[in-house]
Image (cartoon, grey):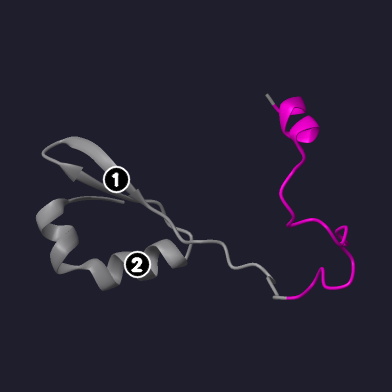
Amino acid sequence: MQYNVHTAKSQLSKLIEAALAGEEVVISKGSKPVVRLTAIPQGNFRLGTLKDKIRTSPDFLDPMSEDELASWE
């Protein structure tokens, strides 16, 4: 589905629903397509899933020694 900017502004809710339903929604200026409206994939993201699985050394936040710093240059 392709819409001009004026129509997209007046029908934004409808276009969002169409994009969420998987339809391709393109907004154009004049006859030139400039924007594609797409849904953001909804994942199963959960905070804390890596808790206790990633470890750092106790001095992780300490400043690097001159030798360590030089190895990064």
- Magenta stretch: give its range: 48-72
Q: Quadrant of the C terminus?
A: top right
Q: Classify residue 52 as left or right of residue 5.
A: right
Q: Amino acid at mark 2?
A: Ile
Q: Amino acid at mark 1?
A: Val
> Is mark 2 in CB contact (under 8 Å) with mark 1?
no
Q: Which mark is residue 16?
A: 2
Horizontal and vertical percent position of residue 10: 13, 67
Total number of numbered discs in the rendering? 2
Residue lying at 28% horizontally and 70% vertically, measured from the top left: 14
Foreground pick, 68 / 53: 68
Asked whether residue 71 is drawn in magenta, I would say yes
In the displayed structure, 44 sits above or below 22; it is below
Which residue was labeled with disc 1? 35
Foreground pick, 71 / 22: 71
Horizontal and vertical percent position of residue 7: 13, 59
Horizontal and vertical percent position of residue 12: 24, 67
> Circle 2 sits in a helix, a strand or a loop, which is it?
helix
Q: Classify residue 20 as left or right of residue 29.
A: right
Label 1 packing within 10 angstroms: few (<14), some (14-19), many (20+): some
Residue lying at 38% horizontally and 65% vertically, measured from the top left: 18
In the displayed structure, 30 sits above or below 3; it is above
